[in-house]
Image: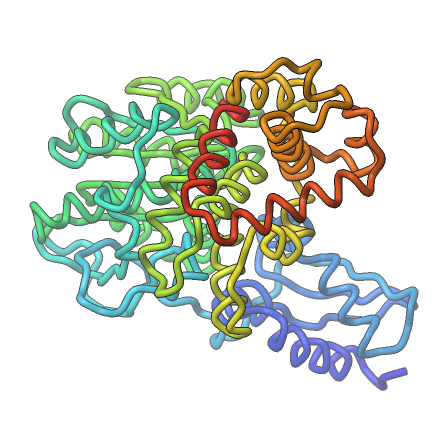
């Protein structure tokens, strides 16, 4: 057992600094002070109750696990105690709004990233046309790179209109959707477009967590006046994931007054959430009402064609190009999250680049296995595939299931088996039963079709058409 709580916490800090990124460590861990040891409980001091609540909700498990590892005591627990002054080194950098510089964008696998902030000690109450902080946006998150489909057309149009005339038509603009469907892309695109036409515009772009962090820090350091001046003097305020405000009464009170100041000053507000305003629990009715003052729009999961278009656009960033059959495999199996869709593509491209492998559908599926398995295979039935293939080749399903073996029946039967294995979760024996065949016949059919696809471009196009028809 370590000799003191100070020694124990110092060892845990070193380990936590290795685990967390620097910004997270500085904001949340560096300000914690060791207070005392109560048998199997370690009491750690923080500046205020809100800080304690946030740490308990988000980092308690990690901190307890780390303390147990460095102490060797499996039953160790942690309690936070407010009212303890944080070390000066824990001060986070000030954050205000401003104009973009021409620095390099984040690496592709960091998307969708928050803009990085650089310190400037210009007064936060400077004249509105004077930028006070540089924001470096992800340059890939522009309107030009946003793939528009039926699922997001209205949200895209609303953001374009907002960037063209901030504070006019849609104020506030509230966009909601499940995670990973492009809300952050649209937020950054809106900000970048406004900065393109009005380079001196004052813009604040924050996640709700970042806004909350700064609010807590302003309370702790006694700088609430500067915090208010900073956020109530911008031309455009964008807050990502406002559902995070739920159950935070003081934060909601502050944002309520910030919202009013900007709205009545004809400044633009754009908000996002994972649900519409009236479904966000734990948020005051008066704030929900203000969220609904302007335009509320959603982004739905993209359809198959839009998902393939997103993959094709993403592929432009890479030298290695994957075939349409592989893109359709990814798009057919990952339907609910664009980040996971792009992550699958990056994984395949990286694998092909490192190994020098030429990928086909089977190899791609094998490599992506766990990722594809996180979402159920498309709800396509064997019967639907049989009907679609029979219609395409102008034969009857009964012919496909019978014992006749002329080429005009045997080949469509093999195609149908191949597509059943690719587009459903059925095993080869199960597919064989649906065709009145054994699993060896299904395996043979798969190999025959794969071999033909490898050397017949016209047949590749034929199979691609069938995939689209089946998934339509």
Task: Say which quarter of the image contains residue 157.
Answer: top left
Q: Is residue 451 above or below residue 106?
A: above
Q: Residue at x 12, y 34 (%)?
A: 164
Q: Nearer the viewer, residue 420 or 454?
A: 454
Can residue 324 be seen at all in this image of the molecule?
yes
In the image, taking residue 367 as reference, residue 339 lies left or right, namely: left
Q: Nearer the viewer, residue 99 or 41?
A: 99
Q: Residue at x 48, y 67 (%)?
A: 23
Q: Nearer the viewer, residue 285 or 296?
A: 296
Q: Residue at x 27, y 31 (%)?
A: 156
Q: Residue at x 79, y 65 (%)?
A: 65
Q: Is residue 120 above or below residue 361?
A: below
- Quarter of the image with the N terminus is bottom right
Q: Position of residue 384 (x, y in %)?
A: 63, 19
Q: Position of residue 259 (x, y in %)?
A: 31, 32
* Colouring: rainbow
Q: Position of residue 107 (x, y in %)?
A: 38, 66
Q: Is residue 142 above or below residue 71?
A: above
Q: Position of residue 313 (x, y in %)?
A: 33, 48
Q: How many marks?
A: 0
Q: Residue furthest front?
A: 406
Can residue 252 be seen at all in this image of the molecule?
no
């Amino acid at each position: 057992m370590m000799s003191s709580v100070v020694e124990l916490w110092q060892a845990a800090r070193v380990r936590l600094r290795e685990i967390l990124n620097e910004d997270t460590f500085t904001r949340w861990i560096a300000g914690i002070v060791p207070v005392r040891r109560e048998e199997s409980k370690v009491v750690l001091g923080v500046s205020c109750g809100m800080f304690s609540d946030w740490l308990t909700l988000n980092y308690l498990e990690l901190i307890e696990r780390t303390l147990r590892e460095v102490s060797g005591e499996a039953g160790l627990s942690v309690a936070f105690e407010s009212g303890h002054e944080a070390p000066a080194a824990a001060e986070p950098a000030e954050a205000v709004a401003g104009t973009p510089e021409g620095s390099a964008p984040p690496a592709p696998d960091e998307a969708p990233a928050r803009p990085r902030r650089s310190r400037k000690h210009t007064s936060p109450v400077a004249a509105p046309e004077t930028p006070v902080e540089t924001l470096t946006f992800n340059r890939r998150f522009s309107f030009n790179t946003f793939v528009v489909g039926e699922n997001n057309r209205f949200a895209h149009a609303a953001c374009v209109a907002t960037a063209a005339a901030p504070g006019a038509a849609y104020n506030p603009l509230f966009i909601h959707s499940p995670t990973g469907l492009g809300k952050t892309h649209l937020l950054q695109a809106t900000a970048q477009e406004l900065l393109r036409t009005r380079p001196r515009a004052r813009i604040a772009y924050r996640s709700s967590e970042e806004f909350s962090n700064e609010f807590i820090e302003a309370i702790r350091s006694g700088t609430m006046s500067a915090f208010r001046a900073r956020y109530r003097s911008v031309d455009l305020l964008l807050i990502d994931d406002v559902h995070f405000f739920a159950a935070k009464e003081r934060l909601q009170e502050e944002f309520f007054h910030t919202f009013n100041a900007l709205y009545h000053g004809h400044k633009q507000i754009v908000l996002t959430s994972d649900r519409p305003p009236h479904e966000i629990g734990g948020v005051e009715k008066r704030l929900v009402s203000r969220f609904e003052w302007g335009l509320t729009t959603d982004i739905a999961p993209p359809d198959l064609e839009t998902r393939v278009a997103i993959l094709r656009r993403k592929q432009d960033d890479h030298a290695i190009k994957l075939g349409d059959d592989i893109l359709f495999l990814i798009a057919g199996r990952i339907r609910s999250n664009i980040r996971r869709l792009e992550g699958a593509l990056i994984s395949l491209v990286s694998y092909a680049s490192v190994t020098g492998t030429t990928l086909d559908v089977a190899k791609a599926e094998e490599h992506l296995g766990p990722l594809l398995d996180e979402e159920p295979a498309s709800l396509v039935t064997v019967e639907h595939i049989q009907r679609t293939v029979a219609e395409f080749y102008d034969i009857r399903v009964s012919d496909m299931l019978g014992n006749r073996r002329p080429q005009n029946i045997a080949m469509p039967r093999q195609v149908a088996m191949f597509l059943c294995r690719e587009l459903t979760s059925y095993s080869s024996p199960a597919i064989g039963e649906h065709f009145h065949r054994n699993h060896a016949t299904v395996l043979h059919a798969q190999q025959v079709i794969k071999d033909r696809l490898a050397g017949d471009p016209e047949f590749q196009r034929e199979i691609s058409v069938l995939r689209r028809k089946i998934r339509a």
